[in-house]
Amino acid sequence: MNAPPDIIYLERHLEGHPLTKKIISKLPGIPVVHIDDYKTINLDKDFKKRADEDKNSLAIAEKKGEVVKSIGRMDDGQYYLFHEIDCKYDCEYCYLQYYFQTKVPVIFVNRDEVLNKMEEILKSEPNPYFHVGEVCDSLAFDYLTDFSSDIADLFLKYGNGKVEFRTKSTNIENLLKLENVPQNLIPSWTISPVYVAEKIEHKTPGFNQRLEAARKCQEHGFTVGVRLDPIFNFEGWEEHYSKMVKDIFAVLDPGKIDYITLGTIKVQKNLLDVLNKRFPDSLIHNQEIVPSSDGKFKPIKFDRVSIYRNMAGWIKDNAPGLDIDLSIESPEVRELVFG
């Protein structure tokens, strides 16, 4: 169920835009406040107050500058989209808590620019990979925008690239309406045990709801991604995560999983400062994390290796032939886990 926003902030020059009209027509009765620039929304409010309250709002704006960006930390040919920024969900480990000045989720209406740029890249590169959900949740507002339908149409035309929708959402109606399913469109879910989801993934659909959404997509003809990241080490974690893995493969078909990836908590100093202000009793504070060579705070290497070995063992017990990858890990850690 999608809770409507409390308020809509609208850049005034976009009032007549077709996508603006479409979104507002689906949110009848929600007050609309006209603004000049989404970047200035509520900057006069205290940071904690903005972070706690403004996710319940929505902004409609125009993206200036690049709408499709190369991901510098990854191989060439990897891109993420700026069709939206920020997220209506409120996961305690999410870097978006501090990444943007305003804390209001933003829908950019100049979607044609995004699609045109994607098509330009598909025409000029042999095998580009587009990550939808790097700076937002890819499907959280799809019920308002129908953007996944537009991307599906594009990827039915081009077979040389892939597009991945990273989400915790259950807004899959547009995907299930597709008569022809692009095999290069991968919906992927971040999945956490019930205990973790309830404890720190605020405002998100629960474990069973996400799993059911992934199952429906598989049945409709999609292969799906499964992201078990971040994995938390707390007292009794093995019981929670081993049960989660068993439950996943009781529902999902391993043969229709595009990839499964594992990761542990990795946070910037900025996020630790935010956590101390917003969530002083967070489960994250129970982790023994230390600065790493890339500047992020992570569990020590051998703790990560132990977690990954356990997780990989449980996955192989339930889905023997499934390849497992690690998220943002060194070759040394990969060798210790899989070597």
Image (cartoon, rainbow, N blue to C red):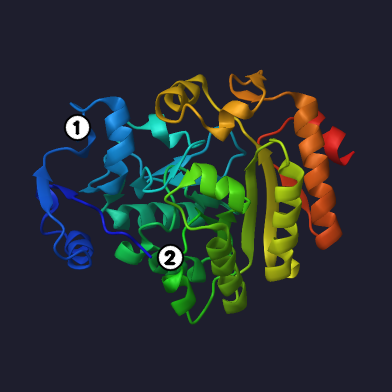
Q: Secondary structure at mark 2?
A: loop
User: In front here: 196 or 11?
Assistant: 196
User: In the image, residue 304 lies at what x, y percent?
Assistant: 75, 32
Amino acid on which disc 1 is placed: Thr
For image coordinates 28% across by 31% down, the residue present is: 49
Relative vertical location of residue 231 with respect to residue 120 in this rendering, above or below: above
User: In the image, residue 233 lies at what x, y percent?
Assistant: 70, 35
Provide the residue designation for mark 2: 171
Asked if one can make out residue 97 in the rendered structure from this viewpoint, the answer is: yes
Mark 1 or mark 2: which is in front?
2
Asked if one can make out residue 161 in the rendered structure from this viewpoint, the answer is: no
Asked whether the beta carbons under mark 1 and mark 2 sit within 8 Å of each other, the answer is no
For image coordinates 61% across by 77% down, the residue present is: 219
Relative vertical location of residue 196 with respect to residue 29 in this rendering, above or below: above
Q: Tell whether 253 sits left or right of 65.
A: right
Q: Secondary structure at mark 1?
A: helix
Q: Earlier in the sequence, mark 1 or mark 2?
A: 1
User: In the image, residue 47 lies at what x, y percent?
Assistant: 30, 26
Relative vertical location of residue 197 with respect to residue 327 in this rendering, above or below: below
Provide the residue designation for mark 1: 40
User: In front here: 253 or 259?
Assistant: 253
